[in-house]
């Protein structure tokens, strides 16, 4: 875990050093290891298999990237693991290098066993900025004849079972207007004003999403949500803003809520805002970039991954959570998936992020029992 934390895999930076480290460790155990780089060549997914080359088996999944860390806010160097009072501190300690380290720690036991079913290690890039690596990985897995059957996504859940979470659809909408003097606003196209109208329409959709929620929705809140994360526009008080940008997201409870929001906003931009903008300036534009559209994890009556992990941990039930993971992507290609990992989501993305030794111990015990189960299958 110290080695992993020492790799500063902030999403804006390369993760190749960490992936090479993981690949070397797994290859030395005899794992069949594959690295898949992104188009830039600076990021990679790792997929490795121990055990027989046959369909089925279980994936241990974790993302390599971490959110930024401002050193001044930390009691110690965020990229150097420090142990204090039964806790291991460092950026990524619980989100998710603790789980990846635990998986790596039990890999020699898997390699030494005669596994009847394979165990797969899936470590991805850019989860924090739209699950970009996992989207590429599941497309690759979907093409294969031998596809895994189940996935454990080791996000921090305090080792509780999670079998449902909302999706996450993130967008950036950019407005191009025409600059001018603030004393004559009618002579320009104020991108800031049209961005404000766009945001107002977004917020109106909150009521519609509440009305669309199922009465028996297990989520809190039970409806799909919309959040406006950032608005940027203009250069000065007395200048008509030529450019504006809105960063926003929706977290769908139901899969169809995502397209409902995106299509409603597309129509509003094209049919209402753009004609008004272009009546003044034909060059005016509104463009929406899809940062990521990540499927939610839908709670299912039958879930073999949930059943297996419940047996391994002794859990009596499963929960749903508000935060997103890569689990829904595995589910989207026909795999059963469950989220269960060491540490608390309350520590993720914060200064002095940590995972306790007790939590890591519980995770190791689960993974050790998994090895025995795969050998006996």
Image: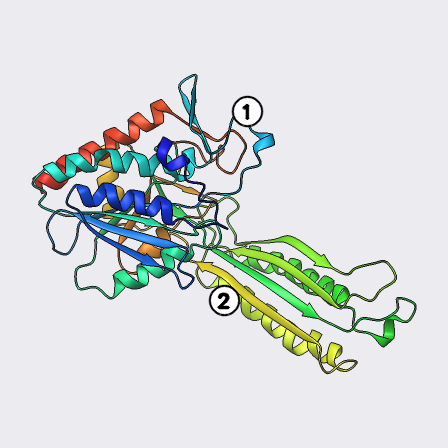
Quickly name the residue at label 2: 259
Badge 1: few (under 14), some or many (20 or more) residues near its Cα, within 10 Å? few
Quarter of the figure that contains the C terminus: top left
Q: Check the image and report above or below for 72 versus 302.
A: above
> The residue tagged with tag 2: helix, strand or loop?
helix
Of labels 1 and 2, the one closer to you: 1
The picture quadrant where one finds residue 103 is top left
Q: Give the mark count.
A: 2
Q: Is residue 267 above or below residue 254?
A: below
Write the residue at 67% across / 75% down. Answer: 285
The residue at which mark 1 appears reads as: 75
* 30 over 39 or under it: above or below: above
Image coordinates for residue 21, horizontal then vertical, percent: 30, 42
On the image, the x and y values in percent for residue 60 come to 27, 44
- Tell me the crowding category of disc 2: few under 14, some 14 to 19, or many 20 or more residues within 10 angstroms, Cα based: few
**Horizontal side, residue 334 vs residue 269: left or right:** left
Image location (x, y in percent) of residue 78: 49, 32
Quick one: SS at disc 1? loop
Image side of residue 74 versus residue 277, left or right: left
Measure how far apart labels 1 and 2 are at the Cα level: 44 Å
Point 25% across, 44% down: residue? 24
Q: Which mark is residue 234?
A: none
* Image quarter hosting the N terminus: top left
Which mark is first along the chain, 2 or 1? 1
């Amino acid at each position: 875990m110290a080695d992993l934390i020492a790799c500063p895999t902030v999403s804006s930076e390369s993760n190749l050093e960490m992936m090479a480290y993981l690949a070397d460790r797994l290859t030395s155990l005899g794992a069949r290891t594959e690295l898949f780089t992104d188009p830039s060549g600076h990021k990679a997914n790792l997929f490795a298999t121990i055990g027989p080359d046959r369909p089925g088996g279980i994936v241990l999944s974790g993302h390599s990237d971490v959110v930024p860390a401002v050193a001044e806010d930390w009691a110690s160097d965020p990229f150097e693991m420090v142990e204090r009072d039964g806790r291991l501190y460092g950026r990524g300690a619980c989100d998710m290098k603790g789980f990846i380290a635990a998986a790596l720690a039990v890999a020699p036991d898997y390699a030494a066993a005669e596994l009847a079913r394979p165990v797969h290690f899936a470590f991805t890039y850019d989860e924090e900025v739209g699950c970009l690596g996992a989207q590429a990985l599941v497309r690759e897995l979907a093409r294969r004849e031998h596809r895994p059957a189940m996935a454990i996504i080791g996000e921090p859940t305090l080792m509780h079972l999670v079998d449902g979470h909302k999706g996450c659809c993130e967008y950036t909408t950019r407005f191009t207007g025409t600059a001018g003097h603030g004393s004559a606003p009618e002579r320009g196209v104020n991108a800031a004003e049209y961005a404000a109208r766009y945001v107002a329409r977004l917020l109106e959709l909150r009521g519609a999403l509440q009305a669309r929620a199922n009465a028996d929705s297990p989520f809190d809140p039970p409806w799909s949500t919309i959040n406006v994360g950032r608005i940027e526009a203009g250069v000065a008080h007395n200048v008509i803003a030529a450019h504006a940008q809105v960063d926003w997201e929706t977290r769908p409870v139901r899969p169809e809520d995502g397209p409902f929001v995106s299509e409603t906003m597309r129509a509003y931009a094209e049919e209402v805002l753009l004609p008004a903008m272009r009546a003044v300036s034909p060059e005016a534009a509104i463009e929406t970039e899809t940062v990521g559209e990540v499927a939610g994890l839908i709670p299912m009556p039958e879930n073999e991954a949930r059943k297996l992990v419940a047996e391994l941990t002794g859990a009596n039930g499963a929960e749903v959570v508000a935060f997103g993971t890569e689990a829904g992507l595995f589910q989207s290609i026909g795999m059963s998936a469950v989220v269960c990992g060491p540490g608390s989501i309350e520590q993720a993305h914060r200064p002095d992020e940590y995972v306790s030794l007790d939590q890591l111990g519980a995770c190791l015990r689960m993974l050790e029992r998994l090895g025995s189960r795969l050998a006996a299958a």
